[in-house]
Amino acid sequence: MKSLFAMLIVFLGCCSNVFFLELLIKEDSGSGNLITFAQFVVIAVEGFITTMRFGTKKTQVPFTEYLKMVLMFFIVSVTNNYALSFNIALPLHMIFRAGSLLANMILGILILKKRYTTMKYLSVIMISVGISVCTIASAKELNHSESENQISSVGDFVWWIVGILLLTFALFMSARMGIMQEVMYSKFGKHPREALFFTHALPLPGFLLLFGDISKHIQIANMSAPLDSTVISVIPFLNTLPRIWIYLLGNVFTQSICINAVFVLTTECSSLAVTLVVTLRKFVSLLFSIWYFQNPFTALHWFGTILVFGGTLLFSDIPSLMRQKSKVN
């Protein structure tokens, strides 16, 4: 029951997080740094209280190891959110990040000298082609769309290319961080909650470098109109709060739920169940984003999406594991 509850919370928490993120981007497309900062503060405070017990608990991993990982984590988080400011539609952003297996495989071969099965190489090719198809399709849609992510000049297209490069950089940095974590866990054991706290608490001073941008978007949030909804009419405080702050509160709250639910899932379920749930969650988030926010999604997008998520399932050996499990039963 605990594992089923964790799966339900992963879907509710993570999908709700994407919902609030899209609402924020619709209101202020350049608020990526403010969103990242707010998420880091909430998760760091929660970890300081629940995991580190107000700083009284001894760390299990040397502090210097966390410093290396934190620097990379900070860069990846800021880059991913900042890319949304460069004409990058959220569905493309989600699909692009789903291709992390490609970056992990490439760096695994180059750094750890790993070798993979033919099925894994095939799955990575599927993911690579899927991302390329979606990228090309999004470029075409931006030329004709009337949405916020519109390319109306050569300059807009150049900024879109910058956004793609930022996503590519973040993808490989994230993969490098994953390899660093793998090596660190092999030396000192797995302590994911401790790592979760340090990767969110230690980068907080780095946001001083982004103070100007964050304060600018705080002012934009303060000037946003209140929500025009009868749903919250019974709560006077929410009736007067600017809508961007309501969306931001929803985003950071659901982000905390999402991360903690995934952690519970990894401790209660097999890797098969975790991989399947996380993959399906991404796909559900993508479908909801397209349907609710009416994002442009062509046949090419669907083809690329099927390749990306199908390749992810193949990479995780889910079909073969399911066949083995059925034989055992």
Image: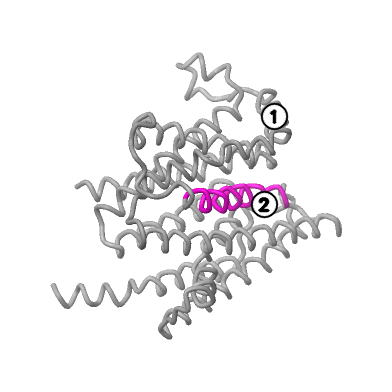
Locate residue 39 relative to residue 212 in the image: left or right: left
Foreground of the two, 212 or 259: 212
Name the residue at the bottom extreme. 118
Residue 141 lies in what quarter of the image? bottom right
Dots 2 and 1: beta carbons under 8 Å?
no
Locate residue 222 relative to residue 186 in the image: left or right: right
- Residue 123: x and y, percent? 47, 77
Which stretch did the figure color magenta? 66-86
Q: Residue at x 14, y 75 (%)?
A: 328
Name the residue at the left extreme. 329
Mark 1 Cα within 10 Å, few/some/many (few <14, many 20+)?
few
Name the residue at the top extreme. 236
Q: Is there any visible trace of residue 165 in the rendered image?
A: yes
- Identify the secondary structure beneath mark 2: helix
According to the picture, the residue beneath numbered tag 2 turns out to be 83
- Residue 76: x and y, percent? 58, 53
Q: Is residue 20 above or below residue 235?
A: below
Q: Which mark is residue 215?
A: 1
- 74 within the magenta span: yes
Foreground of the two, 115 or 129: 115
Q: Residue at x 62, y 66 (%)?
A: 134
Q: Is residue 48 above or below residue 104?
A: above
Residue 137 lies in what quarter of the image? bottom right
Foreground of the two, 274 or 200: 200
Predominant secondary structure, magenta span:
helix
Q: Earlier in the sequence, mark 2 or mark 1?
A: 2
- 239 within the magenta span: no
Type of amino acid at the residue the image marks with label 1: Ser
